[in-house]
Image: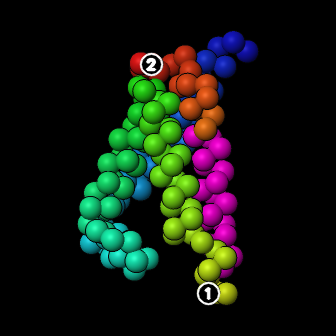
Amino acid sequence: MESINRFIPLAGRILLSFIFVMSGLGKISGFSGTSAYIASKGIPLPDVITVGTILVEVAGGMMVLVGWKARWGAAALCIFTGLAAVLFHNFWAAAPDQAQNQMINFLKNISIMGGLLYVVAFGSGPISLKK
């Protein structure tokens, strides 16, 4: 059981970080589309926000993935994910045909925040580049 418990935090970090790293990398090739979507929500400086989003998702995701300053990476991703939930998945203000989809995405973000808070509280675990 002890050997299994050594690998569970690593598996959790891989699963938790995957969405951020992949999303951040996807925003590089889809930069203009991401920036336009941010602008459509009325958020100022969409190009700057897009660059910041890419940096937070890729850097924070990699920090959690490898377990280097994972608490800091998870905290940044938690704040980012909370903001994304409120600003981009506000199901309470969505058109009726989009409300269910936005609620699912909102709840997904809230659930991911729970996993990130677990990393903030307990760190990266035994198989990591702890610092």
Q: Residues within 10 Å of mark 1 (few under 14, many from 20)?
A: few
Helix, strand or loop at disc 1?
loop
Residue at image mark 1: 95
Tell me residue 111's x, y (percent): 66, 51
- Give the side of residue 32 with respect to residue 20, left or right: left
Tell me residue 22's x, y (percent): 41, 52
Q: Quadrant of residue 62?
A: top left
Tell me residue 97's x, y (percent): 65, 87
In front of the other: 84 or 8 = 84
Measuring 45% from the left and 33% from the top, which residue is drawn there? 72
Measuring 45% from the left and 49% from the top, which residue is drawn there? 20
Helix, strand or loop at disc 2?
loop
Q: Amino acid at mark 1?
A: Ala
Q: Quadrant of residue 95?
A: bottom right
Q: Is residue 7 above or below residue 17?
A: above
Which contiguous range is marked in magenta?
99-116
Check the image and name the residue furthest to the top: 2
Total marks in image: 2
Q: Is residue 11 above or below residue 35?
A: above
Q: Is residue 85 above or below residue 61?
A: below
- Give the side of residue 10 with respect to residue 107, left or right: left
Q: Amino acid at mark 2?
A: Lys
Measuring 37% from the left and 47% from the top, which residue is drawn there? 56
Check the image and name the residue furthest to the right: 1
Q: CA distance from mark 1 to mark 2?
A: 45 Å
Instruction: Indicate whether residue 101 is drawn in magenta.
Output: yes
Residue at image mark 2: 130
